[in-house]
């Protein structure tokens, strides 16, 4: 089997285990179906997710000029507290920003390598947790816009982390935590503007990833430095492909790379 196209974040479907799909222009691959098979990945060229040109990818699948121009890469994406659509103030494209920012958002706790606080659109639950490789997660507040979610995350970051140790996550060196206890412990630190949106009666969501074998240590595949790679796929977690030789490949981190994928 052979597939060719530009890499984008894998699409997922909640299940036992989670199902993963690579989508290309004319076909798709259910990645779960090729576990324990040999896969070859060959980098062919770049293809910016915005302009489509063969230019080096700068960040988030965009070439450098598009990264600083497209509304889908504004600073408020990574820092939701910078959102201004609720004030009718434009960053790059007010219509786009209103559509993205003025909708229900969730502040959550997720346990990937450790407990961390994060923000996502309500429509992206549980996709966001799956993408982060979290084996358990819980909502803390549901607010009507991205700004309120952002200032809540900033306040809670003083009391709990907001980063994932991706190496620990991929070696499955993680512990279970009582997220309900953590949620209640953090409640007093929620900003006054968001306090009314606290979610009091909910339960943890648990994720089961399709992994046959976790690596003992990890070495990251960079297609710029290693444009051709072949290995046996032993698992999928977060947005990473895990291989038998301890190589891990971040599909989302390689968005905008046009590749050929061959499966033996």
Image (cartoon, rainbow, N blue to C red):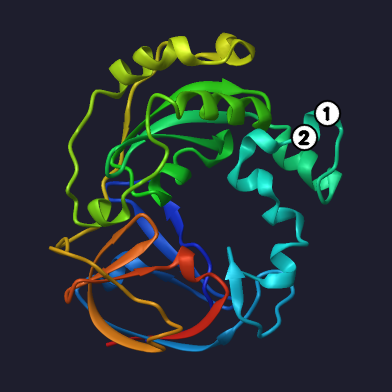
Displayed quadrant of residue 231: bottom left
Task: Return the residue at label 2.
Answer: 84
Name the quadrant of the N terminus.
bottom left
Displayed quadrant of residue 264: bottom left
Q: Is residue 223 above or below residue 212?
A: below
Q: Is residue 180 left or right of residue 100?
A: left
Q: Is residue 192 visible?
A: yes
- Residue at the location (32% across, 20% down)? 182
- Residue at the location (26% across, 57% down)? 167
Task: Give the SS element for disc 1.
Answer: helix
Q: Is residue 80 left or right of residue 248?
A: right
Task: Return the residue at label 1.
Answer: 87
Instruction: Measuring from the top left, give residue 250's x and y in whole percent.
Output: 39, 66
Q: Is residue 85 left or right of residue 175?
A: right
In this rendered view, identify the residue nearer to me: 202 or 153: 153
Q: Residue furthest front?
A: 158
Labelled pair 1, 2 in contact (Cβ < 8 Å) = yes
Instruction: Measuring from the top left, give residue 230's x and y in whole percent.
Output: 28, 86
Instruction: Measuring from the top left, give residue 99's x and y in whole percent.
Output: 76, 41
In this rendered view, identify the residue nearer to me: 127 or 188: 188
């Amino acid at each position: 089997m052979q597939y060719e196209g530009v890499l984008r974040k894998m699409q997922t479907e909640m299940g036992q285990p989670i199902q993963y799909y690579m989508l290309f222009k004319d076909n798709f691959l259910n990645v779960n179906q090729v576990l324990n098979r040999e896969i070859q990945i060959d980098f062919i060229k770049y293809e910016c997710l915005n302009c489509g040109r063969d230019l080096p990818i700068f960040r988030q699948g965009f070439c450098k000029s598009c990264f600083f121009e497209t509304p889908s890469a504004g600073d408020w994406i990574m820092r939701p507290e910078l959102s201004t659509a609720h004030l009718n103030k434009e960053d790059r494209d007010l219509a786009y920003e209103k559509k993205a920012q003025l909708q229900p958002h969730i502040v959550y706790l997720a346990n990937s390598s450790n407990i961390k606080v994060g923000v996502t659109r309500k429509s992206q639950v549980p996709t966001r947790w799956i993408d982060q490789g979290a084996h358990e997660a819980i909502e803390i507040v549901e607010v009507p816009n991205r700004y309120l979610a952002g200032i809540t995350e900033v306040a809670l970051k003083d009391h709990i982390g907001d980063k994932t140790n991706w190496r620990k996550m991929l070696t499955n060196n993680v512990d279970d935590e009582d997220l309900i206890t953590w949620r209640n412990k953090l409640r007093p630190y929620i900003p006054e503007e968001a306090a009314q949106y606290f979610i009091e009666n909910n339960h943890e969501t648990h994720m089961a990833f399709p992994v046959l074998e976790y690596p003992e240590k990890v070495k990251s595949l960079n297609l710029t430095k290693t444009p051709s790679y072949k290995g046996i796929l032993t698992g999928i977690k977060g947005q990473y492909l895990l291989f038998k030789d301890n190589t891990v490949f971040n599909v989302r981190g390689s968005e905008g790379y046009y590749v050929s994928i061959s499966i033996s």
